Amino acid sequence: MAIEERATYCRICEPLCGLVATVEDGRLVRLRPDREHPLSRGFACPKGIAMTEVQNDPDRILRPQRRRADGSGFEPVGWDEAIEDIGRRLRRITREHGGASVGWYFGNPGAFSYSHALWLRGFMTAVGSPNLFTAGSQDINNRFVASRLMYGSLTRVPVPDLTRTEFLLVIGANPLVSHGSAISAPRIRDQLAAIVRRGGRVVVVDPRRSETARAHEHVPVRPDGDAWLLLSLLHVIFAEGLEDGAAIARQARGLPGLRAMAAAHPPERTEARTGVPADDVRGLARDLAAAGSAAVYGRTGSCLGRHGTLVAFLLDALNVVTGNLDRPGGAVFGSSPLGIERLADRLGLATYARKRSRVGGFPDVLGSFPAALMAKEITTPGRGRVRAMFVSAGNPVVSVPDGDELSAALSRLDLLVSIDLYVNDTNRLADYVLPATTFLEREDLPVASLSLFTTPFVQFTGPVVAPYGEARQEWQIIDAIARRAGLLPFAPRWLGRLTNRVPLVTPARLLDLALRLGPRGDLFGLRRGLSLAALRGRPHGVVLDEHVRTGVLRDVVRHRDRRVRLDPPEILAEFERLGEREDDPAYPLRLIGLRELRSQNSWMHNSATLMRGGRSHSARIHPADAAESGVEDGRTCRVTSPYGSIELPATVTDEVARGVIAIPHGWGHHGGGWRRADRAGGANVNLLTSSDPADLETLAGMAHLNGVPVRLEGVTVG
Ligand SMILES: Nc1nc2c(c(=O)[nH]1)N[C@H]1C(S)=C(S)[C@@H](COP(=O)(O)OP(=O)(O)OC[C@H]3O[C@@H](n4cnc5c(=O)[nH]c(N)nc54)[C@H](O)[C@@H]3O)O[C@H]1N2
Ligand SMILES: Nc1nc2c(c(=O)[nH]1)N[C@H]1C(S)=C(S)[C@@H](COP(=O)(O)OP(=O)(O)OC[C@H]3O[C@@H](n4cnc5c(=O)[nH]c(N)nc54)[C@H](O)[C@@H]3O)O[C@H]1N2
Ligand code: SF4
Ligand SMILES: [Mo]
């Protein structure tokens, strides 16, 4: 028997913790934390360890599946036959209706595979379709747009300098559970504790007393009250002359615009919106301004309200005004050893508003449109209507607003193809479900995270096991489908028609090239530096620097004068829209989301270990709200929004403020492909959220998922 141990890294969430895989005769038998990983140093969370169960899950699909002719479920089919049929149908659809009739939804796990992300781009370029949708409009696109408006570069996202900061202000993130997002910081719990240990503070602004809030200082805020809170913090700083005038003069322009926005919002006036007492806001502003160094950091809780881009802008504005941008212990800009940011700018990939969506006229963000529009892009007649869809590594029926509308739309397509590990609630409607490899079955380098490491780091891993069954990597599947459809990835359609006999370029080749020619590269032997070969010899990864470099702002900012904008016109216009909407008093409570330690969005509820203890879905409700609505702890309740209604068990707890209901997304599976997850019950919380273009955030097309007006009722089971 051949038993081997192989170092690799986890690709479930963003710290990318080091793992060691035990492989026996080509099968994964165990994953354990890698003690030799220089950053995660022997830490991995329960999800990472439980990936063994996904890898070996009997419910995983390991052969291509085709919808039966009579529509009754799937039957296995050979790869050649599947690719042949998909390619032929795709060719017909694009011939008759043009490239725009092809849509693609690219889900969250895809972002952890550089080859998948790259080939998908190549495919969409070749088809000539603008209809790319991603999880980004439920997640982070507002952050990118804020960076574009402030720094002139979509891809430059500041990260809090965790290893050095003296004051971390966290707005709408729960890193003790999520393990950090839009930052890659293994052992983040320890990192936050270390801030306090060295005499600093961690302050958490959240409507729920989250795990992170409980471990540190908590400022409860009303859902979606962040814009007002941040404006008031700025107000106090300006009113009391606490700003760092020298830093502002050196780094930024447009201060009067920002001042004017803040001037209108003294904390006494925003108290009703934020629920934060004016004195507390004043105290927080003074402490933040006085701190030796400070970083203001926001994540999904700050992204998914009605004004996510404005909020992201205000977070960074606060960093600028307190003199904490691009400075040790502040909000700092990492850089990729692949030189990706520069490359993306040069190749014109980091686009904003270059195209407009057919429905709603929303700007593209990094070449993608809001996923909430997918259903209407499929059902709205006219030129450019989507008739063929691909869904890779995604479950949008559960993760995108109005899953019922999307299900109905997907079943009207001429062709629906999914690339996934499982049959889920989305691809159960597909013509084909094609089996993808897991991350343990593919090589990787965390291309999308390299500039987000709070300690600059890079790691390359080979596959730790060969693909099970007939699973294939996404890029291989995409390449095969493209060629069968007469397309050549990355080339325009006319070229693909002339020839698709161009030899295969592999992602690894391109990666090696980017590494070697990048800012840390070995320039093919001209200097000591990075190459794939060098990284293969360092299986636990390489720390590139002790700290993120500072003093780089002039290089980061792409505006001609190299200054941060504090008054982008788009932001000023959005500011005018603040609070414009009146909510219907029939829905007096506010719905927010949360994440759970033993869930990963919608896709790990089939693991026995993670589901141990009879875990179930529930709505967290304040005791007073529960009493008022006749809801009892552990009993079923009904939550209704203007858009839909769901029933699920109630957890009555004062960890949420009065008026707030917190429900995690990713539950309520009915796909038939996950036996344990399907049995676990729960409800799809996104039946309560709106896909109406009028309800999407204006600048980035963000779905409104936090602060949704709802009402609550007890359910009497007869
Ligand atoms: N265990 C686990 N880890 C995960 C995931 C998972 O599903 N499970 N998902 C991964 C993914 S895809 C992502 S994007 C990241 C997200 O990473 P985080 O953003 O850190 O994720 P959450 O834990 O949802 O934290 C968001 C917090 O915002 C709060 N919040 C909600 N509404 C508001 C509001 O209006 N204002 C403020 N100030 N706060 C608000 C919520 O109560 C919650 O505590 O996590 C990743 N990590
Ligand atoms: N109400 C509400 N909704 C939300 C959020 C919220 O906070 N509140 N958060 C949003 C956020 S931040 C995110 S990121 C989205 C996530 O939403 P999605 O990306 O749409 O969905 P996931 O639940 O991550 O499902 C991923 C699918 O990928 C499959 N998969 C896993 N690994 C691989 C792989 O390596 N290759 C392939 N091909 N498939 C794989 C899984 O089996 C699963 O079917 O949800 C969003 N939806
Ligand atoms: S924290 Fe995230 S990256 Fe680390 S082991 Fe858990 S799931 Fe994997
Ligand atoms: Mo996400």
Image: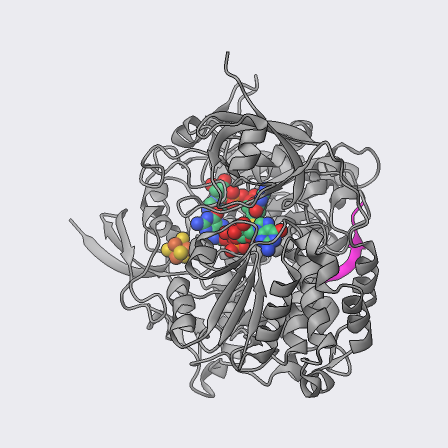
In reply to whether residue 460 is colored magenta, the answer given is: no
The overriding secondary structure of the stretch rendered in magenta is strand
Q: Is residue 234 above or below residue 354?
A: below
Q: Is residue 480 above or below residue 11?
A: above
Where, by quadrant of the figure, is residue 359 drawn?
Answer: top right
Residue 475: image location, x then y, percent: 52, 52
Where, by quadrant of the figure, is residue 38 drawn?
Answer: bottom left
Q: Nearer the viewer, residue 398 or 575?
A: 575
Give the left or right position of residue 324, taking residue 180 as reference: right
Res 86 visible: yes
Give the left or right position of residue 259, taking residue 179 as reference: right
Q: Is residue 230 above or below residue 674?
A: below
Residue 595: image location, x then y, percent: 49, 47
Q: Residue at x 68, y 36 (%)?
A: 588
Give the left or right position of residue 164, taking residue 129 as reference: left
Total count of labels: 0
Res 157 visible: no
Q: Nearer the viewer, residue 251 or 534?
A: 251
Residue 651: image location, x then y, percent: 46, 35
Residue 251: image location, x then y, percent: 70, 83
Q: Nearer the viewer, residue 323 or 477?
A: 323
Magenta-highlighted residues: 351-358
